[in-house]
Amino acid sequence: MEIKETDTLWIISIIGLLLLGNVTSAVAADGNSSNNTDFTDSVDCKSRAGSEAEIKNVIVLIPDGCSQSVETLARWYSGKPLELDNMVTGTVSTYSTDSIITDSSSAATAFAAGYKTTNGFVSVGPSNSSVLSTLEIPPEELQYRPLATVLEGSKLEGKATGLIATSRVTHATPAAFAAHVDNRDNETEIMKQMVYENIDVVFGGGSSYLTPVAEGGKRTDEENLTKVLLDRGYQYVDSRDKMMNLSTGRAWGLFASSHMMPDIDRSLLAPEQPSLSEMTGKSIELLSQDKNGFFLMVEGSQVDWADHANDPNYAVTDFLAFDEAVKVAVDFAKKDGHTLVLVFPDHNTGGMTIGSNSDSNYTSTTVEDVIAPLKGMKLSSAGVAAKMGTDLSSENIKKQLKTWWDIDATDDDVAEILELHTNGENLSLDYAISEVISRNHTVIGWTTHGHSGDDVPLWAYGPDYPTGHIDNTEIAGYIAKELGFDLNKTNSHLFIEVGEVFSTDNGDGQLDKNEYLLNVTDSSNPVLEIGDAELPVSTNILIKNGVAHELEGIVVYAPATGKVYIPVGALSLVNGTKINGIQRAAAA
């Protein structure tokens, strides 16, 4: 039986009500044992500051894996106040569904989509297999369900959108704003979803995930996504100079096949790459041309990696590069008057302290004791390890440490480095170098090479910014409210579970107009078939009668549950009804 337009509208209205109930059930406010949070109510209970000007643009900046100690050290190192020093407004809790200590993907899901989720998940609902004792078990319907993000909501509002990272753009934090997978390492799928999300500006690393293996890339689905971008009218650039020459329009700029260089290594090892502040400035220049406003996320990705490595100079220099990007954003916000700038780490990494076991006489610690060892460092620990290469003789290790870090390493230092790298903990060479040199030649202490579960700072500038202590899930609802949309309604608009609307294939050899089938003949390119319509998974394309139509969102397949989710607009195209009527009904 064919679904009529009036029937379709009725179904969508019912689904919307059901989803609004289901979707709100997994957000956990800090200190609550319940997972039920209404986005609008949660943000109203927070103190706010700043002017009451209408917010048209939101810029989110994230120094990944950062703590207050990094900011403090950066201030001592630079010898002057930081841009962020005038912006401290509160703190943010960071735990995930299954752990006090979050990873970047679950943390980013919280502030991009407003949900606690499982570590390793990217903007999909949590698994029920492991949940903190202080949280309620999330409802079955939420497991692995794609969760709408503030970037997707902004796009539906007609705003321009942008993502910037110094990592691969498919890495956990940027991925959570534009993709929906249950494994953060599935970066080929993440890249495909990002390309088909129609983001206006994307700058960072990771070009190898655009091209097939046969062309030197990482893709096993044989799709050349660079060609897709060009066919869609994007400008594609791969160097600083080309990026700086952009003046208008939509653009992708990927400046490394994998991650971009640490800021301290960039001038020496990759001078063709732009700085984070340059990428931020160019993105704002392009996005601000949209009369409806914009949403932009900027990640200083590598503060985290520096802290993982226990490399204080790498951490400080990348944080200072991040602070310069913050200044670019704030300078724009000051002139514009309708831009909210929100800055916060996703979690702490490394547990840096200014003071260590080697600093036993702390009452006489000087500024020089803190910064002098760092000032002689000209490369990151990864850069020094690369200079050492395979020659791990005592002579070469000492030579490279003296040349690039101005450290007079001792025989004991070399023995400790080799013990950690080859005989003991099997640490990577850069981790072993920085751990030993931090311990023996600086007053900077570390508690771990991993993440920690403490709260992180909240910095803000602009109209109506939040203050006090908030949970990371509250940030998404706050952004959505300020930009004029409701994430619950965005969820019900972008992600209709196909089985709620259509019947599964009855196996008679053909699909009726109200039947669907997930065709996995090509496992790398599954296709949802509904009647005579085809919807390739992880794209925003619906093909019917040989004509390709662009949808407002992407088709998402959740392998763990076997469910497929499609935007509301796909229903009207499948059944030949008017798309505008469908959209109005869904938003009502």
Image (cartoon, rainbow, N blue to C red):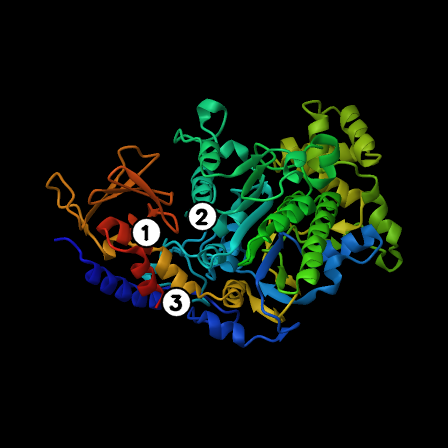
Q: Earlier in the sequence, mark 2 or mark 1?
A: 2
Q: CA distance from mark 2 to mark 1?
A: 13 Å
**x then y, percent, for residue 564:** 30, 49
Q: Are marks 2 and 3 in contact (CB under 8 Å)?
A: no
Q: Earlier in the sequence, mark 3 or mark 1?
A: 3
Asked whether 351 or 566 is in front, the reply is: 566
Image quadrant containing the C terminus: bottom left
**x then y, percent, for residue 515:** 18, 48
Q: Is residue 160 visible?
A: yes
- Helix, strand or loop for disc 1: strand
- Helix, strand or loop for disc 3: helix
Q: Amino acid at mark 3?
A: Ser
Q: Amino acid at mark 1?
A: Tyr
Q: Earlier in the sequence, mark 2 or mark 3?
A: 3
Which residue is labeled 3 in the image? 25
Q: Tell me the number on the disc at residue 565.
A: 1
**x then y, percent, for residue 175:** 50, 47
Which residue is labeled 2 in the image? 179
Q: Residue at x 23, y 62 (%)?
A: 11
Asked whether 505 or 101 is in front, the reply is: 505
Quarter of the view holding residue 309:
top right
Q: Is residue 332 above or below residue 513?
A: below
- Helix, strand or loop for disc 2: loop
| 588 relative position to 457: left or right | left
- For label 1, count other residues whose C-alpha is less than 10 Å away and answer few (under 14), some (14-19) or many (20+): many
Asked whether 477 or 102 is in front, the reply is: 477
Q: Residue at x 38, y 48 (%)?
A: 554
Quarter of the view holding residue 393:
top right
